[in-house]
Amino acid sequence: MLSLKIYKALVNPVSLFSSIWLWFTFLSCLGLWGIYVPSTKAILYILISTLFFSVISFITYLRCKEIELIKKKHDIDKGKIKYVPLIVINFVSIIWLIPILVKTIPLLFAGEWQLVRFYYLNANTIHVIFNTKQALVCQWLVFPVFYVTTIISAYLVAKKKSNITLIIISMSGILMAVLVTAGRNALFKCLLFYVLAFLINSKRLKEVLKRIKESNIFIKILIVLGIAAMIFISSQRSLSKDTSALQNAVYYFTGPIVYFSYIIENPENFALNGSFLYGKATFGFITTPIEIGYSMLFGHDYAGADNIITTYVNQYINLSPSIKGNAISTALYPFMKDFGVLGIVLGPCIYAFIVNYVYANSKKNMFWNCLSIYMLYTVFFSEWQYELLFPQSFSIIVFLYIFLSNKSYKLKTI
């Protein structure tokens, strides 16, 4: 209720962060279907991090109001979409993926979704479909192009300026990403970008529902197909043959809390007894591109914070007596890898400042609005992992800046 009073919006950084973290922590404490209950210490850490994220969020947002960053009148439609280079780079990205798609399609038709996913996640050691460089190009360049195009398309739809050309191109890219990785993550991001675009650009829930209702029939069909596709992929990649769709969903949303609890109880397995990164993970969207450039320039092995953390969270642990999981360490582990136990406070504070500074400027112009959509996505996903840790976040921010300028421009509908 306090966040609603301050932000004047039902969905905001605080409501999103606290709802996701507290609700799924509560759900994990129920121990449904044998899932392990998180430790008291893990729950305490989550409560503390949520408190500090909320407090710094309020302070940052209110401070921005004071200095008239959001009080000042801005033209939300200000900004020019550079359509031609955006469309060209999408076509180049899609063409680049075709040779990989040719290898994955036969396996997918044979029902080998898990195998394709395994090949993608282990591209650094198993070069059946991807080699290491191809996987990195996908993660750092190709997929960010598709995500940025989707964010821009979602923004235009939310503003009742649907651009069918961009929608078709972005959906084609998302489909390609799904088919070459056998993952539902790209679809999940796509749907979430659209939902958040409507929420950020509408003051009330009724207005959101009205805008969705008034949207192009093509958009409604795509949403239904996207949800259906996610359900299908989930059925192909079930955690176990004996688990239902509901059980899979519960494991998917509560697993990260259990994994984080395991990290807290076994700090030596995750290098939390020393050798901290001192901000390299928290500011990964800045430090990892620098590390990439350094490794390429001097021929050294890449040692970015994302690579270090991924090495540890690749460990599979039991989420229940029969279900295992990995790579779902939540955003709190990178914060702790940076600052130790103090990371539970410092990490959420820094993250809250970044998110709320962007969110406070969401009405300034098109670039800030689209960036706010992405930042709220990272907040939603923070229960699974810290998105700003990865080079992909840097690419998305840069591409948004490149394809959206600040010159006055009247949005066109195509």
Image: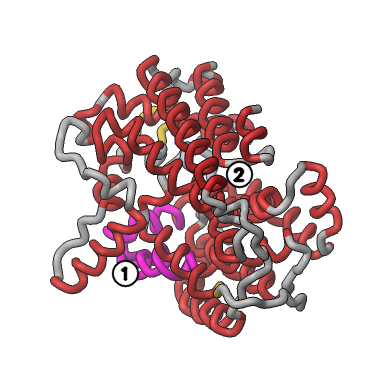
Indicate the position of residue 271 as horizontal and vertical percent values: 20, 35
The residue that mark 2 highlights is: 235
The answer to if 195 sits in the magenta stretch is no
Disc 1: which residue = 133
The residue range painted magenta reads: 116-144
Q: Is residue 120 magenta?
A: yes
Amino acid marked by disc 2: Ser
Compared with 97, 334 (above or below) is above
Type of amino acid at the residue the image marks with label 1: Lys
Apparent side of residue 140 relative to residue 413 in the rendered image (left or right)? left
How far apart, in angstroms, are the residues tagged by discs 1 and 2?
30 Å
| The label number, if any, that marks residue 16 in the structure image | none
Mark 2 packing: few (<14 Cα in 10 Å), some, or many (20+)?
A: some
**Lower position in the chain sequence, tag 1 or tag 2:** 1
User: Residue sitting at 70 percent across and 54 percent down?
Assistant: 201
Residue 253 coordinates in the image, percent (x, y): 53, 34
Q: Toward the viewer: 236 or 372?
A: 372
